[in-house]
Image: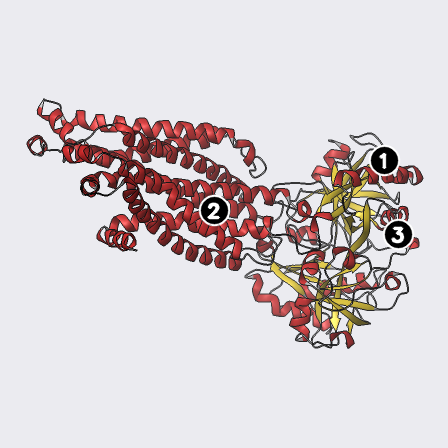
Amino acid sequence: MTDLRYAFRLLRSKPLFTIGIVSTLTLGIGASTAIFSVVDTVMLKPLPFHDPDRLVWVAERNDKLNLPTFSASALNYLSWKEQQPSTLEALGGVRGLSFVLTGSGDAEQLTGAGITASLVPLLGVPPVRGRAFTDGEDRPGGEAVAMITEGLWRRDFGGDNAITNRRIVLNGVSSQIVGVLPDAIGRLLGAEVAVPIAIDPAQERRLNHVMTVVGRLRAGVTVDQAQSEMDAIARRDGVTYPEIKDWGIRLVTFYRWIVGDQLRMSLVVLFGAVASLLLIACANVANLLLGRAASREQEMAVRAAIGASQARLFRQLLIESLSLSVVGGLLGIALAVASVRLCNAELPQGLLPVPSIEINAPALLFACGVTLVAGLLFGIVPAWSMARRPAHGALKQASRSTVGGARAVLKRVLVAAELALATMLLVGAGLLGQTLVRLQHVTLGFEPDHLLTFQLSPPMGRYPLDGKAQLFYRSLVERLRAAPGVTEAAVSSGMPMGQGNYTRTPMAATSGGAVPVGTTIPIDWRIVSPGFFHLMRIPILRGRTFTDADGPNGQDIVVVSRAMARDFWGDADPVGHFIRRVGDGKELMVVGVVGDVRNNSLDTEIPSMYYASARRVWPLMDIVVRTPGDPASVVASVRQAVRSIDPELPISTVRTEEDWVSASAAQPRLNAVLMTSFACAALLVAAVGVYSVLAYSVAQRTREMGVRLALGSSPGGVVRLILREGMTVGLLGIGVGVLGASALGRVLGDLVYGVPVHDPTTFVVVSATLTLVAFAACVLPARRASRVDPLTALRSD
């Protein structure tokens, strides 16, 4: 306690020194704790299912079509179940649906899912209330029952404990609520309400990939063992059903499915960046303490001379270091809490596979551990250096300056390490920053400004998909075009960058193409209404687009993108040619070619084609309107137009198209912002480190500078000496950092777009910037050395 009181008294006597160290540690510990909280919540925390390591996503794959993972068909799922794989304990399936909830207040559109009765028991998480579905309920003609998620139960039903006695109306069908699903299952399903899936083999096609299938491995079975068995099943099914001979099965662990490769790599890179920042902070603090050690040599010598042991001195100095670390750690935890709250408020929904980030017990333990390790890391070397210095040598030396020695070498090594790490961070920040700039300036293929989008899911009981739904959407588009503030309106099964219904289907060339007849290519496709291309400002390159005359009794027609036309027909005009849809064998005539659109993400451009909404629609469709001003100003008009047709039909997912585009860049934006923040902080701390080392060196070499000036050396010569000393250390650190950044380029390969990982411009600009920063940090100590008064310096000896 005496040592502790003395340490705090000493730190209060040097407020600027203390503030500098504590601020550096707060930044390093706070940033590392915040990022660790994200890593722990997303990557380290066990998935909220029973024995999650045994859960797998049973995906289909097609190597010829370059589809490593794809949804499963309902008929294939039934085939797998019938063959009862010995390595899998159970199989379950999910199919996306959409519901309109009525009968409990205002109509509400809900995300939904059809699930097999085996799914909830397979996941091993019991319902919060009630029960799961039974085997008899997931058969065609089964009883109308439903399960709602815990969030919906609390939000719309007030957490009513008697919820299993209530009935709700879903898409016009009265259903009995039998249970409440945990939110963890709701997030996995992407749904707020679930109903039993009813697979009718007579209504399904084997190549209609509409299901997500999950399985549970038997105890002691590895993924590779299960994969071998499922490969054998796929081969047998390929012989029995020749149309799927090119399709296989791929098992993916739940962890790799839910925490995607790119997200996992982003978090690893960011955690590495913040760890580098923490190391730079520790190195800088160690340098500051080493510099301060020179002014305390006499104090330590006197203590040793009157009986203090090396262990006693070491303890005192280490307690001072740990005191600084503890204060920095406490402030760092506060900074981490504030940062996590900001992330939860600002991060787009769906960016992370968890509802929110938490500062939990592991994060606090991490912060405490980092605080302790940091205190020891930057405190042991200075404390050991001072405690073991002979007392008689320090007293004899008195004010005589010292040059060189192990301490000076260590300080230079620490500064070089700081600059090396800062170089690596700045190169990473530069590459990710260029990625963000390129994504923001990528050619979208459409104009997203002044567009408002929303979704509708008319109940199929009242709006069957075989005709009445198309008439509803045609009438709605007419009403919307007449609404105040709306200039154009259209319908699509999926907006660019948005949610909705769209998929990739293998299409085969039939004639006159650039690929052999029968060759299949997976094509991204959507359903759109007449006027969609004009509204979106997608250019029409050849032929025509859709009209209201393209009804269900006409020819099956499609409009294709320029990339699809090029892939199938090369430079030839595709209008009038046919392609065949793999699965049902239906031939489709191309009537037009439109410009390429970034439909799914900013960094990929996939060949696309479009169907006419007059011939088919999905149960859930997107509506888009163009306005002359702020799209948000027409929300009321849009709602009124929908209510004028059906007062019980709610709209959902109301967003501007610019919001969708912005959200698609959220991951690279987060990577770039965080990496740039860490890099700038590292640059600042490293610059302070260079300055402190040179300032310390000049202070220690005052007598030497005086002698040099007294013997005729010019002030300019002294400046060049100090600059040469500082820049040698600086350039060495920068050079090592450039080599390190080159070696780590492959780590960033999956995170950058439009820029090579060894981009010479980035490396040159970063090296030049750091060189200028190091030079600027050297100038002030060098000028101070050149102004030393020779008489004063010599007299001080």
Give the residue pinned by disc 2. 674
Marks 3 and 1, the one that precedes in the sequence: 3
Q: Which mark is residue 204?
A: 3
Q: Quadrant of the N terminus?
A: bottom left
Indicate left or right for 725 with 513 as reference.
left
For the residues marked 2 and 1, what is the alpha-carbon distance in whole angstroms? 50 Å
Indicate left or right for 772 with 268 as reference.
left
Relative image position of residue 547 (x, y in whole percent): 77, 53
Give the residue pinned by disc 1. 510
Marks 2 and 1, the one that precedes in the sequence: 1
Q: Quadrant of residue 373?
A: top left
- From the viewer's side, name the closer residue of 610 and 679: 679
| Residue 331 in view, yes or no | yes
Position of 158 relative to 494 (above/below): below
For the residues carrying marks 2 and 1, which lies nearer the camera in this image? 2
Position of 408 relative to 49 (above/below): above
Amino acid at dot 2: Leu
Amino acid at dot 1: Thr
For the residues marked 3 and 2, what is the alpha-carbon distance in whole angstroms? 48 Å
For the residues marked 3 and 1, what is the alpha-carbon distance in whole angstroms? 25 Å
